[in-house]
Image: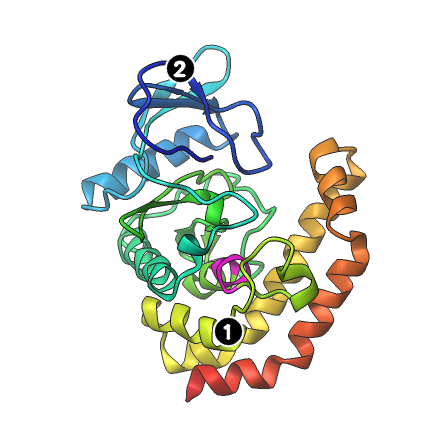
Amino acid sequence: MAVEGEATKDEALVGGMMNAGAVVRRRTLVERPAPRTAHALHSYLLALDEHGFDAAPTPVGLTADGRERLTFIPGDVALSPFPRWAMTQNALRSVGSLLRQLHEVSATIPVDPDVEWPRDLADPKGGTMLCHNDVCPENVVFRDGRAAGLIDFDLSAPGRPLWDVAMAARYWVPMLEPESAVALYPAGLDAPARLRILADGYGLSRQDRAELPDVIEQATASCRAFVADRVAGGDPVYTQALAERGGWQRWDRMQEWLVTHRLRFTTVLLE
């Protein structure tokens, strides 16, 4: 979802793939399809606000036709091909910092064990705190060049904080081989250096830094399975995106590139 400026009438919000064309802003509120876990997720979002984290939408309610209403977070959201302002080092560092703030508060909020949280992009090892799992550029709101808000918590599920960092790194570094990166990102981004900046912005421990490259490879495999499930199910949005972005050969190159550069990423993270 993305918007710039202040709207005075109903406005369709664009960006992202899962709810493309189904999200509308009505002045200070956003109305969108409610996820299956909406009731539990709304309780979580309200708890974030109660614990002082004001960088996430506040739920207002559910409609009879299966939609949810949340407060609108003003600012700028980057859409692909991603502009250079969203890929500066300061922007990257602020994404890490905001994610750390989310995790520190999220760790204090009990996870409802009876909820069937989505497994699409969830940490396969599970965890005791709720993670966002989809901190991509389309889901981060910027103000004055810094990450100021997180939106679209639909894929949230229990997991390790490191898994959330790995997922964010995939999009923000990005953890893509150059041929794939050039189609969506500004030229000249130094992946190892940017991975270090994200880790520094988050304040990642030395042990987590040593594990991060391997977890990124695991997260990439999960993302590939996520796309494969949707393509197999006939989802036209994901099917078209797969074809336009190089098919499964692109995923093969990406995964091979991650393995080839694993030592380099680890070295830079631990320097």
Residue placed under numbered mark 1 in the picture: 212
Give the vertical position of 119 relative to 72 (above or below).
Answer: below
Q: Earlier in the sequence, mark 1 or mark 2?
A: 2
| Label 2 environment density (alpha carbons within 10 Å; few <14, some 14–19, many ≥20) | few
Q: Which quadrant holds residue 139?
A: top left
Query: Which disc, if any, is residue 76?
Result: none
Query: What main secondary structure does the magenta stretch of the protein show?
Result: helix
Relative to residue 83, is residue 236 drawn left or right?
A: right
**Residue position for label 2:** 10
Q: Hey, what amino acid is under mark 1? A: Leu
Secondary structure found at label 1:
helix
The percent coordinates of residue 64 (x first, y second) are 46, 10
Q: Amino acid at mark 2?
A: Asp
- In which quadrant of the rendered view does residue 90 lie? bottom left
Foreground: disc 1 or disc 2: 2
- x%, y% of residue 155? 51, 43
In whole angstroms, how far apart are the C-alphas of marks 1 and 2? Answer: 42 Å
- Membership of 171 in magenta stretch: yes
Which segment did they paint magenta? 167-173
Q: Residue at x 43, y 52 (%)?
A: 131
Q: Is residue 45 above or below residue 67?
A: below
Who is closer to the viewer here, 4 or 21? 4
Asked which secondary structure carries label 2, the reply is loop
- Identified at 44% across, 59% down, the residue is 87
Asked whether residue 177 is in view, the answer is no
Image vertical order of residue 232 relative to residue 163, above or below: above
Quarter that holds the C terminus: bottom left
Q: Could one spot residue 78 in this view of the protein?
A: yes
Please report the residue visible at 67 percent of the width from the left and 48 percent of the height from the top. 226
Is 77 on the left or on the right of 171, as rendered? left
Q: Nearer the viewer, residue 269 or 206?
A: 269
